[in-house]
Amino acid sequence: MPKSSANLTYGMHQRSDRPDFYIRDQSERPALMQPHRHDYFQIQFNFGGDTVHHIGGAVRPFVRHTVGFIQPHRLHFIPHPADGRFMVINFTTRFLLRHLPHDALDLDDIPLSDAPELALFRFQEFIDFVLTEEDFAQAEQLLISMHQCDRNREFGSDLLLRGYLLQFLGLVCQRYQQTLQQMVASKAEKRGQQAALQRTIKYVRQQIANPELNLTDAASAAFLSANYLSHLLRKNIGKTFSELVLEQRMELARTRLLNSSESICNIARDCGYLDEAYFSRRFRQAHGMPPGQFRRQSLTPPFKA
């Protein structure tokens, strides 16, 4: 995927004509045709033109009458066929969850009993939300109402827009209530977080020798924004990204020191350090002694009187 787009998180001001809520079809603004993230919620409606939805670490079918629910900071991409018809709604966390003071990075911590509006977004990586003809027709009427209301904003319009939006979310939640309840019971969103963390750790280990190893590229590998990955690391393992990388590099250094006769210089390079002296300082900070002394003491049998 193009690095420039995968590492960019769009704000409402970059992709919307309004700061809180914006609805459009494909004729009003070109679609982003590369993997990307945004710091707002998005809903995409497929009126025709079968394709797929890349969301997080999943690839799901996105056929006619499918609706996609994208939570902030999730890497996603829906290739739009040339003859496809789509509508898109963008809205902020504040617009959807006015009664809750949570930041977009903390959405996974909110119990669904407090914010059932989040259910569809939280489980998008696990469920294909394909509507019946009847349900999609009802959704289309709500979209028409939203579109008209958004184009003619006046006092009270935000209340009407929120009402239309909640009606639509309620419609889909009712149709998928059994599946959503199963997702909640199985803690599917936690599995998704753990999978993202495992992708991060795997990437760090694969790139451990790279002196340029950084949070932004690791977040792309985990299909997350850098901010959200930092949040997950602090919440789940209590470490920053830099601390995780240091931990992995020191673990590799110990293994190489104890199980090989490689030079300190080569071990430093394989652990991502171009400067042997700097590697030795970091090793001493972590273990209380330089790497050469660590190797000698660990490999020397204890003296018995």
Image (spheres, rainbow, N blue to C red):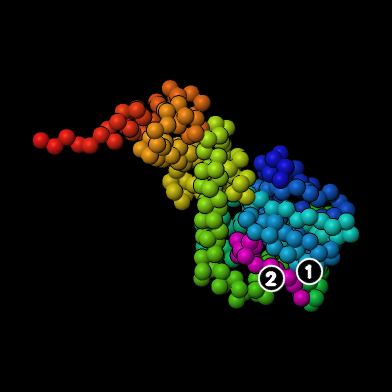
Residue 92 location (% of width, % of height): 67, 51
Residue 90 location (% of width, % of height): 73, 53
Residue 257 location (% of width, % of height): 38, 35
Question: Residue at coordinates 68% horizontally, 60% vertically from top-left?
Answer: 59
* Image quadrant where residue 206 sits: top right
Question: Residue at coordinates 71% horizontally, 45% vertically from top-left?
Answer: 1
Depth check: 31 or 160 in front? 31
- Secondary structure found at label 1: loop
Callout 1 amino acid:
His
- How crowded pointer 1 is (Cα within 10 Å; few <14, some 14-19, many 20+) is rated as many
Residue 146 location (% of width, % of height): 79, 61
Residue 244 can be seen in this image? yes
Which label lies toward us, 2 or 1?
A: 1
Q: Name the residue that disc number 1 marks.
A: 65
Q: Quadrant of the C terminus?
A: top left
Left or right, residue 103 beside residue 45: left
Residue 246 is one of the magenta-drawn residues: no
Depth check: 270 or 113 in front? 270
Q: How many marks?
A: 2
Left or right, residue 261 beside residue 130: left
Q: Which label was assigned to residue 251? A: none
Left or right, residue 301 beside residue 160: left
Part of the protein shown in magenta: 119-132
Examine the rendered structure and indicate whether residue 113 appears above or below residue 234.
below
Q: CA distance from mark 2 to mark 1?
A: 12 Å
Examine the rendered structure and indicate whether residue 30 appears above or below residue 180.
above
Callout 2 amino acid:
Val
Residue 157 can be seen in this image? no
Mark with earlier residue (2, 1): 1
Question: Residue at coordinates 78% horizontally, 69% vertically from top-left?
Answer: 65
Q: Name the residue that disc number 2 marks.
A: 172
Examine the rendered structure and indicate whether residue 203 appears above or below residue 213.
below
